[in-house]
């Protein structure tokens, strides 16, 4: 049976051209990690499910202009093998943010934070602006990528970014660029140009899928991209899985054909993130500012609710098998952390 939610790839001729890099200096992820300019600090948290986390610096904890949303790690990128899961020996976390409010949406766009978490007591990071290269009248422009960025997945060298009702944006971390004139990039020294995109498409008569968050499932012979949607009670809150191609690090449809999910499930309201841990679904859900979040564990249709065990404002979630931990983050100003959860306590299949 054909499932109604498809992702249509952008035509290959519209992909980022190497001519673009003749005008900019490509440094890749290594270049950003060697030039981190902000420092977080390790914190002990009071939420029952948290076993410790990172607090951003004061500017990023308090700013009302940017809200953190998605999370992925080098363990996603390089697999569950005990000897892998790092980038050149470094444990790296990437977090996405969106420009909050009408002004933030129009002027700021979206960004990621590259975090070196090799030493949990001394995490360091740097913000990178997401941009879409455009050429007009013979001139190269870098337009901000305006998406909610509620979920991200680092797979091989590609970074998938959730684009809500629009579908999914794709970036290549080798394409990270150092910019000489920061006025062109809203003050950012480094930018990540969009490589391509997948546009959401739905059968007539079916409520369109919203790609609110994403994660990576490496639990079988074939890797899968997991996506889901935030919805209040009475709304839509579905989970889907798409096959990934381990050779191209893109969706298994290739460069021309539409990608269709292999399964669709209805889950719970107010989902903020979902990930599979050895076949078991783990879902975060929020309950409004100031109220603790919930952790749901099981399978769609039979999810067990651990009420109030997460900090207020939980967002995306990812599985870090080498550490035996789930990693998540929170969004509210003044209460922003990136934190770990001991998976063995909450997920039977993680033991």
Image (cartoon, rainbow, N blue to C red):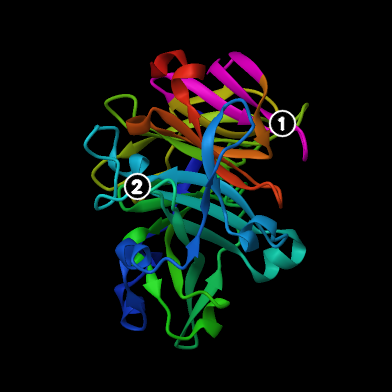
The correct choice, above or below, for 211 with respect to 94 in the image is above
Question: Up-down: is 332 above or below 326?
Answer: below
Q: Position of residue 138 (x, y in %)?
A: 45, 88
Instruction: Residue at 29% x, 32% y: name it.
Output: 80
Horizontal and vertical percent for residue 123? 45, 53
Residue 299 showing in the rendered view: no
Q: Is residue 146 found left or right of 290 in the rendered image?
A: left
Q: Give residue 287's position: percent from left, percent from top.
A: 75, 32
Crowding at mark 1 (Cα within 10 Å: few <14, some 14-19, many 20+): some
Observer-nearest of 327 and 272: 327
Q: Could you say which is closer to the camera, residue 29 or residue 22? A: 29
Q: Give SS at disc 2.
A: loop
- The image quadrant that residue 230 belongs to is top right
Give the residues drawn in magenta, as a range.
277-306
Helix, strand or loop: magenta stretch = strand
- Residue, x 34% and y 38% (percent of image)? 244
Q: Residues within 10 Å of mark 2 (few under 14, many from 20)?
A: some
Q: Can I make out residue 279 in this image?
A: yes
Please tell me which of labels 1 and 2 falls first in the chain: 2
Residue 91: mark:
2
**13 left or right, relative to 341:** left
Residue 219's image quarter? Answer: top left
Percent of width and height locating residue 116: 39, 54
Q: Considering depth in this image, is 254 or 213 the residue closer to the camera? A: 213
Residue assigned mark 1:
292
User: Is residue 7 on the magenta stretch?
Assistant: no
Residue at image x 30%, y 29%? 222
Q: Residue drawn 35% across and 59% down? A: 173
Q: Cβ–Cβ below 8 Å for labels 1 and 2?
A: no
């Amino acid at each position: 049976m054909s499932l109604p939610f498809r992702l249509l790839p952008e035509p290959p001729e519209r992909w980022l051209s190497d001519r673009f890099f003749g005008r900019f200096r490509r440094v890749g992820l290594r270049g950003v990690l060697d030039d981190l300019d902000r420092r977080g600090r390790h914190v002990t948290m009071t939420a029952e499910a948290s076993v410790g986390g990172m607090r951003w610096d004061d500017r990023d904890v308090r700013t009302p202009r940017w809200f953190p949303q998605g999370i992925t790690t080098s363990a996603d990128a390089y697999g569950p093998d005990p000897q892998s899961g790092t980038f050149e020996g470094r444990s790296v976390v990437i977090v996405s943010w969106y420009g909050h409010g009408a002004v933030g949406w129009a002027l700021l766009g979206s960004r990621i934070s590259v975090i070196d978490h090799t030493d949990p007591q001394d995490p360091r990071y740097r913000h990178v602006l997401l941009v879409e290269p455009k050429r007009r009248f013979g001139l190269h422009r870098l337009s901000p990528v305006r998406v909610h960025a509620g979920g991200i997945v680092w797979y091989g060298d590609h970074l998938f970014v959730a684009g809500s009702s629009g579908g999914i944006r794709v970036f290549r971390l080798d394409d990270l660029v150092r910019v000489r004139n920061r006025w062109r990039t809203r003050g950012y020294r480094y930018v990540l140009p969009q490589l391509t995109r997948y546009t959401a498409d739905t059968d007539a008569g079916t409520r369109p899928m919203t790609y609110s968050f994403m994660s990576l499932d490496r639990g079988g012979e074939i890797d899968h991209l997991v996506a889901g949607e935030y919805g209040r009670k009475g709304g839509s809150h579905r989970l889907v899985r798409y096959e990934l191609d381990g050779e191209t690090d893109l969706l298994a449809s290739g460069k021309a054909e539409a990608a269709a999910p292999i399964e669709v499930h209805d889950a719970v309201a107010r989902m903020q993130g979902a990930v599979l841990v050895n076949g078991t679904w783990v879902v975060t859900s929020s309950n409004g500012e100031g109220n603790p979040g919930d952790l749901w564990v099981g399978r769609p249709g039979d999810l067990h609710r651990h009420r109030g065990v997460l900090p207020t404002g939980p967002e995306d979630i990812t599985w870090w098998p080498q550490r035996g931990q789930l990693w998540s983050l929170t969004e509210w100003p003044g209460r922003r952390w990136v934190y770990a959860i001991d998976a063995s306590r909450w997920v039977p299949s993680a033991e």
